[in-house]
Image (cartoon, helix red, strand yellow):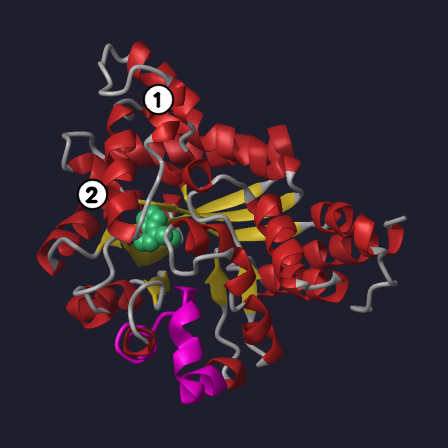
Amino acid sequence: MYQTKPVAPERLPAFLRSLPKAELHIHIEGSLEPELIFALAARNGLTLPHASVEDLRQAYAFHDLQSFLDIYYAGASVLLFEQDFYDMARAYLQRAAADNVLHAEIFFDPQTHTARGVSIETVLNGLHRACQDARSDFGISASLILCFLRHLSEDDAFATLEQALPFRDKFIGIGLDSSELGHPPEKFARVFARCRELGFRLVAHAGEEGPPAYIWSALDVLHVERIDHGVQCVQDSALMQRLARERIPLTVCPLSNMKLRVYRQLSQHKLWQLLGAGIFATVNSDDPAYFGGYINDNFVQTFAATGLGAQHGLTLARNSFEASFMDEAEKRACLQRLEQAVEGFE
Ligand code: ADE
Ligand code: ZN
């Protein structure tokens, strides 16, 4: 079932693009394209520090995670009203559907907005309505994961959780993102324990820039079900063995890793090593408006740079559904569509 026919090298990009897939690591604020930043600024009567779309894009030269985050949070400041959040998520979902994404699990950063006086209700109503409409309009299912910003305090995360709980039917999980170094998972042990009691699905960024120890503590202290990024696990063979043995998904984002200088070149990416070690990896876009590519660009460019082949593509697409938080029937339906697409690929 999960064996591909041989795919000629020149047909590999088309094959990868054609694969039905799930996206499990996408920050919705990171899908905000410069054109939409300018359109929302105009609609909301805001003046931007950049003269034009091109001028803003020019500023997208990052040397590490923090240099990106500073620009990313500034970009999100044009989001004020429910319709702004709706328009941003709708644009992403339409674009993802064009990449044959059947299902997306979307991160959002409420503290970025509540700190500016935008209510969590405004954020969630806009994002959630876009997810609902995308099912009928673009044939893509989507759910939301609320991320705590790890550079802020655990008390701030608790306050955010309290604000969000009246709308808990609108999001399925909790994540942890923002500046990793110096903010280990342990800092959020109590709030994650509470989220676990409440029945949320749990994920955390760990081992993007941070050490393998952060991956261990995301698993053993926060009890997350997936690790976002996790590429630094290659420094720790015991950890790699554990990830493989326990089938813990990693949501890997190759173009992000290159743009934030985790690797100097895409050819140095460790995706092949992860797959070779039997690790349950997936490929995702992270912040596509900032890193120069959506999910299919991540697949195509990484495969071209590292020499991965069609069978790896199929494994990654299959992993994306299996690692998702869809129920078993939904997973089966997606896996069937994957099988049909592979059989039908000429
Ligand atoms: N927020 C948006 N993108 C992120 C990333 N790559 N790492 C941590 N936090 C983020
Ligand atoms: Zn991320």
Circle 1 sits in a helix, a strand or a loop, which is it? helix
Q: Which residue is mark 2?
A: 111
Quarter-wise, where is residue 164 in the image?
top left
Looking at the image, residue 190 lies above or below residue 98: below
Q: Would you call the spot at circle 2 few (<14 residues within 10 Å), some (14-19), or many (20 or more)?
A: many
Q: Which mark is residue 321?
A: none
| Helix, strand or loop for disc 2 | helix
- The amino acid pointed to by label 2 is Gln
Name the residue nearer the viewer: 201 or 199: 201
Q: Earlier in the sequence, mark 1 or mark 2?
A: 1
* Mark 1 lies within 8 Å of ligand 1 (Cβ measured): no
Residue drawn at x 30%, y 73% as measured from the top left: 211
Tag nearer the camera, 1 or 2? 1
Q: Taking the image as drawn, is residue 225 in sight?
A: no
Q: CA distance from mark 1 to mark 2?
A: 27 Å
- Residue at image position (86%, 50%) is 345
Q: Is residue 217 magenta?
A: yes
Q: Give the magenta range.
A: 216-242
Please give the residue where the numbered disc 1 appears in the rendered image.
55
Query: Is residue 56 shown above or below 21?
Result: above
Counting from the top left corner in percent of width and height, residue 11 is at 81, 49
Residue 297 % position (x, y): 60, 44
Residue 14 in view in this figure: yes
- Which image quadrant is residue 76 in? top left
Viewed as shown, does residue 238 lie left or right of 165? right
Check if residue 73 falls in the magenta segment: no
Give the residue type that dot 1 points to: Asp
